[in-house]
Amino acid sequence: MAPVLRLKQGPAATRVLGVGSHQPERRVTNDDLSQLMDTNDQWIRDRVGIVERRFAEKDELLVDMAVAAGTNALADAGVEPSEIDTVILPNCTMPSPIPNAAAQVADRLGIKAAGAFDLNAACAGFCYGLGVASDLIRSGSAGKVLVIGAEKLTDWVEPTDRANAIIFADGAGAAVVGPSDEPGIGPVAWGSAGDLVETIYMREHRFLYQEGQSVFRWATTQIAPIALRALELAGLEPSDVDVLIPHQANLRIVESIAKKLRAKGAREDMVVADDIRYSGNTSSASIPMALDHMRKAGSVRSGDVILMVGFGAGLSYAGQAVLCP
């Protein structure tokens, strides 16, 4: 008789236990950028909604920012490093694919012998990572997972490129995910549009390039349906959403998604993240960083139903409904 493999069985549900973030100290205003290129404050505000963003110094690495955000998330969750057995680090801006960031971050946080891997779904990375973390726990493959979206986009943006240098910035956001008696993280709604891969890519393996208008049209027409799909999978209606946190790519895109959801029944008092105003586009870090900032500002409360949706290069997209810790 052939042997039968034994499988683990995890808890039925998961939730976010805590969040944290980190931004570099250096603030870069639109007026600062106007000294480097043909642009001005009003032009940038009108097109992308950004007032200022944060740039890391040369010696502040992606791994450093991830460690700081992870430390803050662990403290917020009241979880010791020894309780974490898996670290997932969504990012697309490591200086080299080897070694990965996750193992380095785990070691520096004191998380020993952890399962540790990077995940590259660009700006959708955090939602991808959150979905994977939840499924790992529910399958019994992990107990508690630390998910950290971290990016140092200034390493990959040509400093005088008006189309991109005004948008992208640096930072990290993290969440601790653990088991729960009641569902706190809904199923992930994800997918990709690989036929549009050339709309965002690394040009000459050095600088980030995107066809801004093509990406704008895609995001403003395709992402709201993905958000609605995430609600459907979680058994929720648009009117159940207290907080909408889309990837902070462009304030006009964020507002377009919110408008489409309200047309489908979302409430007028639904809080909409606008962290891009003062953080810029930080790719996989933008959603958890926005959540952390909103909690600190008091615009999001424990138990609120949050709809997250990320989208970006690939083109990749993902979203889920989450209860605020």
Image (cartoon, rainbow, N blue to C red):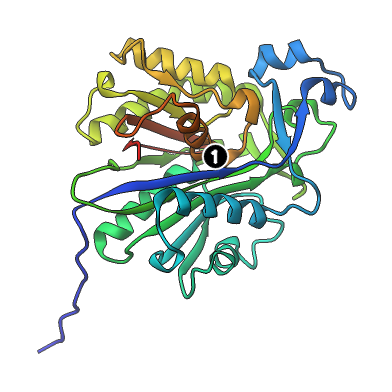
- Residue 240 placement: quadrant: top left
Q: Quadrant of residue 47?
A: top right
* Horizontal and vertical percent position of residue 29: 77, 24
- Quarter of the figure that contains the N terminus: bottom left
Does dot 1 land on a helix, a strand or a loop?
Answer: helix
Q: In which quarter of the image is residue 145?
A: bottom left
- Find residue 50 and report its horizontal and vertical position in percent: 67, 21
Residue 137 seen anywhere in this rendered image of the structure: yes
Q: Where is residue 199 in the image (x, y as percent from the top left)?
A: 62, 34
Q: Nearer the viewer, residue 31 or 251?
A: 31
Residue 122 seen in the current view: no
Query: Which residue is at 77% across, 48% downward?
Result: 206
Q: Residue at point 18% right, 53% down?
A: 12
User: Label 1: few (<14), some or many (≥20) within 10 Å?
Assistant: many
Q: Seen in the image, is 321 located left or right of residue 62?
A: left
Q: In this rendering, would 287 be left or right of 143?
A: right
As drawn, the residue found furthest toward the bottom would be 1
Amino acid, disc 1 = Cys
Q: Is residue 162 above or below residue 23?
A: above
Position of the C terminus, as image quadrant, is top left
Total labels: the figure holds 1
Whether residue 104 is situated above or below residue 274 in the rendered picture? below
Please state which of residues 318 and 308 is positioned toward the viewer in this rendering.
308
Which residue does the numbered mark 1 point to in the structure image? Answer: 123
Q: Check the image and report above or below for 155 versus 11.
A: above
Q: Would residue 173 be found to the left or right of residue 233 on screen?
A: right
Name the residue furthest left: 1
Q: Position of residue 266 (x, y in %)?
A: 31, 16
Seen in the picture, residue 186 relative to 102 is either above or below; the reply is: above
